[in-house]
Image (cartoon, rainbow, N blue to C red):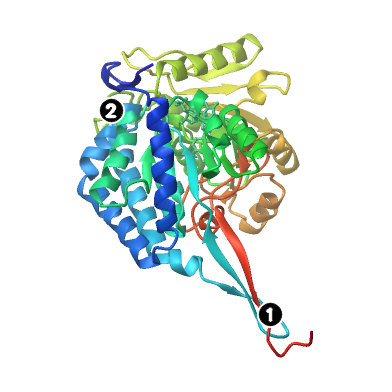
Amino acid sequence: MPIQSINPYTLEILTSFDEMTEQQVEAAIAIAHETYQTWKFASYEERAKVLNKVASLFKAKKTELAKLITTEMGKLIKQAEYEVDYAINIFEYYAKNGEAFLADEVLKVETGEAFIRKSPIGVLLGVEPWNFPFYQVARFAAPNIMIGNTILLKHASNVPQCAKAIEDIFKEANAPAGLYTNLFMPGSKISTLLDDVRIQGASLTGSEKAGASLAEAAGKNIKKSVLELGGSDPFIVLEDADIERATTLAIYGRTVNNGQSCVASKRFIVVEEVAEEFLSKFTAKMSALKLGDPMDTETQLGPLSSEEALNAILKQVEKAVSQGAKIETGGKKADLKGNFIQPTIISNITPEMDLYKEELFGPVASFYVVKNEEEAIKVANATEFGLGGSIFSKNIERAKKIANKIDSGMIYINHPTKSSTDLPFGGTKRSGYGRELSALGIDEFVNKKLIRVISENEKL
Ligand code: NAP
């Protein structure tokens, strides 16, 4: 099957690529493994030089790379430009701080010496999603290249041009062949690669189904895995919150990346005292969003990434309505050629409905009214996901106490969850395990090797 690049706004097929043959995949693994034998002994300076060169090429190509994102998956062009900058920042961050993050850790012993040396482990397989085609790859590849591992990267099939652009940049940066190799393969064939002894670990960002498949293969082969999966982040609004600000941030939280972010705010949980005010402001702002061409800087909401994604979310909305939920605004396919859904808010959702447990990957908000703080915490935790979440209150100490009671990997107070290079990113429960970014993100695929020196004077 050819791997197609389709513009989700115009629905035009832009280009397509052939799936790699078995021989090509074998050659990719072989070169990644061969390069690892020397890259693992390369100096930090040499590794940082490659990352900095990659960053400078991203800078030089920023406009063209941002356009690629927008034409392949529909992100608004300004957000695409921001994503390219963010990827640059990640490459530079690990080039600058990697050596310090990986420094020996001296352990206290009575005689002789003991320390932990962080060593690379080998060829890694990265499986990445389409929603942030450059940022997701940067946050996996940069720290691991700095450690001394080599990378095989299987990108989502709907962003093949972005996938190829990254590999081309590594080539142009004069990185050793095999340091970073793109795999044009369908997701269904990826997990079996972990049976290969030359591949030592895998990281996947994507759905639970894909994550479970990869982790199963890693577990069977006793290999390390990191999973960054879906989320259904709560957005809790307490009675003492600034409602005007909270509703503006609710729009940002639910519609950034056209609603297709793992840490988008998905469940709006508002205490009854301010629920009416919140809902009326939120509805007014949501229904006023300007839909259209993601290349146009005036557009506020672009198309979903694919026709399948659009159909899936429309089906979730229809089912919720058939089970008794109420549409406050939107709910239908928008009257535009591309994969557009109207910005939507759904209320009257009960625990018996499927939507109560599901992730909504698009600009569709679930709205819940709760009596008080305790009930807000209960609804926030009534999900199998545990990625991010946010709490809106003027009382920071109160919000911090609530944050302590929410089962998720990240909680932001007075802002939807977001990602920063120097802060850890990751989840708990069915949202996955392991962390990316910050000093924690460079610690996942390392061998924390103990080196112990016994003093010759020690009694035998
Ligand atoms: P997806 O279908 O799981 O795709 C993600 C990647 O996994 C793609 O490269 C895909 O390849 C591959 N894949 C598919 N089936 C696979 C399998 N059986 N074994 C191994 N790999 C497989 O994800 P999606 O639905 O497009 O992306 C949205 C999901 O990702 C959402 O749930 C979202 O919340 C989550 N996400 C999480 C984070 C995070 O940091 N936690 C960030 C972004 C997105 P193909 O394209 O070839 O199928």
Q: Residue at x 67, y 36 (%)?
A: 220
Question: x%, y% of residue 455?
Answer: 68, 85
Q: Residue at x 32, y 39 (%)?
A: 80
Q: Residue at x 35, y 28 (%)?
A: 73
Q: Is residue 435 above or below residue 23?
A: below
Residue 457 versus residue 76: which sits nearer the camera? 457
Do we see residue 187 in this rendering? yes
Residue on which disc 2 sits: 71
Question: Could you tell me the amino acid type at mark 1?
Answer: Lys
Question: x%, y% of residue 366?
Answer: 58, 27
Near mark 1 (Cα within 10 A), the count class, few <14, some 14-19 or many ≥20, is few
Position of residue 31 in the picture relative to residue 170 (left or right): right
Q: Is residue 265 above or below residue 409?
A: above
Q: Residue most toward the right?
A: 460
**Which dot marks residue 13?**
none
Q: Specify which label sits upstream in the sequence, 2 or 1.
A: 2
Residue on which disc 1 sits: 108
Does any atom of ligand 1 lie closer than 8 Å to the CB of label 2?
Answer: no
Question: Could you tell me the amino acid type at mark 2?
Answer: Thr
Position of residue 90 in the picture relative to residue 110 (left or right): left
Question: x%, y% of residue 453?
Answer: 65, 79
Which secondary structure, mark 1? loop
Do we see residue 155 in this rendering? no
Near mark 2 (Cα within 10 A), the count class, few <14, some 14-19 or many ≥20, is many
Could you give the CA–CA distance between mark 2 and mark 1, rounded to whole angstroms? 55 Å
Do callouts 2 and 1 mark residues in contact (Cβ within 8 Å)?
Answer: no
Q: Residue at x 62, y 55 (%)?
A: 395
